[in-house]
Image (cartoon, rainbow, N blue to C red):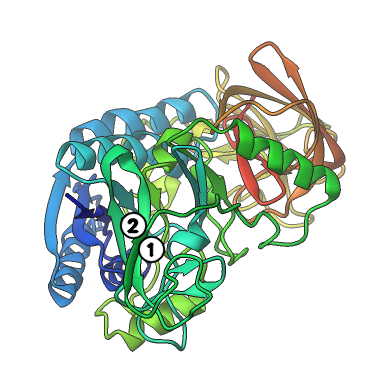
Amino acid sequence: MNEKLKVYVGMSGGVDSSLAAALLVEQSYDVTGVYMKNWTADLPGVKCPWADDLADAKRVAVQLGIDFKVFDFENEYKHKVVDYMIDEYKNGRTPNPDIMCNQEVKFKLFLDAALADGADMIATGHYARAAHFDNALPIAQSELLRAGQNEGPGALFYSGSRCSDQAIGKVLSGDELVISCKTSNSDNAVAKDSGTSSTALSEPLQPKFDQAPGPLSDLERSRSDRAVDEVPKKSGILKMAVDANKDQTYFLYRVTGKALGKTLFPIGEFTKSDVRKMAAERGLTTAAKKDSQGICFVGQVGIRDFLSQYVDQQPGDIIDKKSGKILGRHDGAIFYTLGQRHGLDVGGGLPYYVVGKDMDKNEVYVTTDLNDNTLWKDTVKLSDVHWINEAPSEGKYKIRVRHRAPLISASISFDGDDVILKLDNPQRAIAPGQSIVIYDGDICLGGGIII
């Protein structure tokens, strides 16, 4: 018997996940909102916002008329994300907890718990897109799910043809994905009459690899086509969001293709301003809520303040790298990262930048020379490499050295399980422990941890 696709959407209490849930409801998915309870501890002088966020998520769920659940991952989160982050800092590296959260919690714990609870797919409010593969049928998310703008509250698109707001995603035997919709478009490839049709697509839809953020070169297009052919069935590929400024694929590069095959990113086709406008038009209570800042799981808290609660402050020397002169004192080398300028408090004159640290000696080394060779790298080695699907061939690709950094060109070669990146142009402040993410056109292939 046909069933509507059951989607569990992660609702953080923010505008992005709220709109994601609303768009899914408008597409007639069977939607359940889920708040992931990952962290509840307060810090001195700072109250953890989890209770307020939970209340906001509940309010939106009530507005939308959907079921709502709370999944408690606090113990696992402490072990897999927080402890990992603290250990990395203790070892002198600069980790990214958001990346680990996505890998271990949102697209592993949450996905597994949702599927075990009866969901067919999950959805989140990330700015990203996914192309899905099921039974050898590639389906670009922009074809599968896109809310209508200026044409009613929601719409599904297939090959540029718009289904009505009554469009329903269904699963048939064998997990074959179909769309049922009403339409007055006689040329619609899915529904060819004015009534309701439930028809499997007769021809595979190819993901639109040149949709955003720009046109692909012939080489990139060729590799993209090959990547599609090599993706395992019931899997997916990760693509950049339409809003390049908000794109979050950097934080998602450690998600598996298998997980992406079970994931929807409903707002990946929209800009942030569009999201806020659409949320306001729907009267969502979170439409004007400010985006969270600081550490992902604590809120308005900087990393230094957070670490101070879990590691002992150990004063040490700040040393001029060139002269060897002691310039000042610090509260602990653990709090500093390569390229850091602020927080050194070493007097006037030219600004100083962190160019290294010795965790055993608890010393921080600085310089005023922006051309110091320690600050700039044109060759980087990555360990703990993760590919969303298959590893790419050696050659030229685009990389991102940090979130919102511009895409730059680099050549990839392999050294066993590690990756060697030869950058076309040297980059500043590439810090051990951070991630570099690799792209082929607008497809996120994966990445690794800087050694």
Q: Nearer the viewer, residue 241 or 326?
A: 241
Q: Residue 199 at x, y = what percent?
A: 38, 58
Q: Amino acid at mark 2?
A: Gly
Task: From this view, report whether residue 363 is shown above or below residue 2.
Answer: above
Q: Report whether residue 305 is seen.
A: yes
Q: Amino acid at mark 1?
A: Ser
Residue at 38 percent across and 40 percent down: it is 101
Q: Residue 11 at x, y = what percent?
A: 26, 59
Q: Residue 312 at x, y = what percent?
A: 36, 30
- Quarter of the image holding residue 222? top right
> Quick check: marks 1 and 2 in contact, CB under 8 Å?
yes
Q: Nearer the viewer, residue 20 or 303?
A: 20
Task: Name which of mark 1 and mark 2 comes first in the sequence.
Answer: 1
Q: Residue 95 at x, y = what percent?
A: 50, 35
- Quarter of the image holding residue 93? top right
Judged left or right of residue 319, residue 218 is: right
Determine the secondary structure under disc 2. Answer: loop
Mark linked to residue 299: 2
Residue at 46 percent across and 54 percent down: it is 201
Where does label 1 land, which residue? 292
